[in-house]
């Protein structure tokens, strides 16, 4: 099938959004903001149907990513994630993904509140790959 991002043939990842016809290559989807969940049914979603965070989090002044210490967006979005447990820890998607890959499932937790269960469940849902080891 033809990729809806690059328009080249060979796309194999389908959006699981209701009646969504979008199909994309995994790398193209990642660049465009698509989310692939690395658990359960391994669902993927296009930029229109991807899961979003429903966290009531308020920033004070300019909030920084806890990992790289650079500014994050003013509210949770594709590139900016928030810990669902404490709602005080903000991260860039690329930073928390790197942390997950380095930590693996046994040590991956919110760097601020140290929550494991709620934090990992939400990160999985938002497409953060957390390896077993």
Image (cartoon, helix red, strand yellow):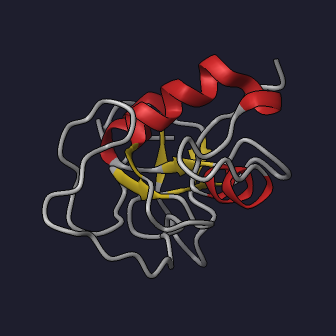
Taking 84 as reference, is 113 above or below it? Answer: above
Relative depth, front residue between 25 and 99: 99
Within the image, what quadrant is residue 18 found in?
bottom right
Taking 5 as reference, is 115 above or below it? Answer: below
Q: Position of residue 30 (x, y in %)?
A: 42, 38
Task: From the viewer's perspective, tell me whether residue 69 is left or right of residue 44.
Answer: left
Q: Residue furthest left?
A: 61
Relative depth, front residue between 10 and 17: 17
Count the marks: 0
Q: Position of residue 128 (x, y in %)?
A: 59, 42
Q: Work out whether residue 10 can be spotted.
A: no
Q: Position of residue 91 (x, y in %)?
A: 39, 46
Q: Residue at x 29, y 36 (%)?
A: 6
Q: Residue at x 67, y 47 (%)?
A: 114
Within the image, what quadrant is residue 5 found in?
top left
Q: Position of residue 78 (x, y in %)?
A: 37, 56
* Quadrant in the picture for the C terminus: top right
Relative depth, front residue between 24 and 106: 106
Q: Residue at x 80, y 55 (%)?
A: 117
Q: Residue at x 14, y 58 (%)?
A: 62
Q: Work out whether residue 20 can be spotted.
A: yes
Relative depth, front residue between 6 and 74: 74
């Amino acid at each position: 099938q033809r990729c809806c991002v690059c328009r080249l043939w060979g796309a194999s990842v389908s959006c699981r959004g209701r009646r969504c016809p979008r199909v994309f290559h995994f790398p193209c989807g990642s660049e465009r903001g698509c989310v692939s969940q690395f658990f359960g049914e391994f669902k993927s979603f296009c930029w229109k149907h991807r899961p979003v965070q429903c966290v009531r989090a308020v920033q004070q002044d300019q909030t920084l990513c806890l990992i790289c210490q650079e500014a994050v967006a003013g509210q949770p979005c594709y590139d900016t994630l928030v810990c669902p447990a404490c709602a005080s820890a903000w991260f860039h998607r690329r930073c928390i993904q790197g942390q997950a890959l380095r930590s693996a499932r046994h040590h991956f937790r919110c760097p601020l509140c140290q929550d494991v269960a709620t934090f990992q469940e939400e990160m999985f849902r938002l497409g953060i790959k957390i390896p077993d080891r």
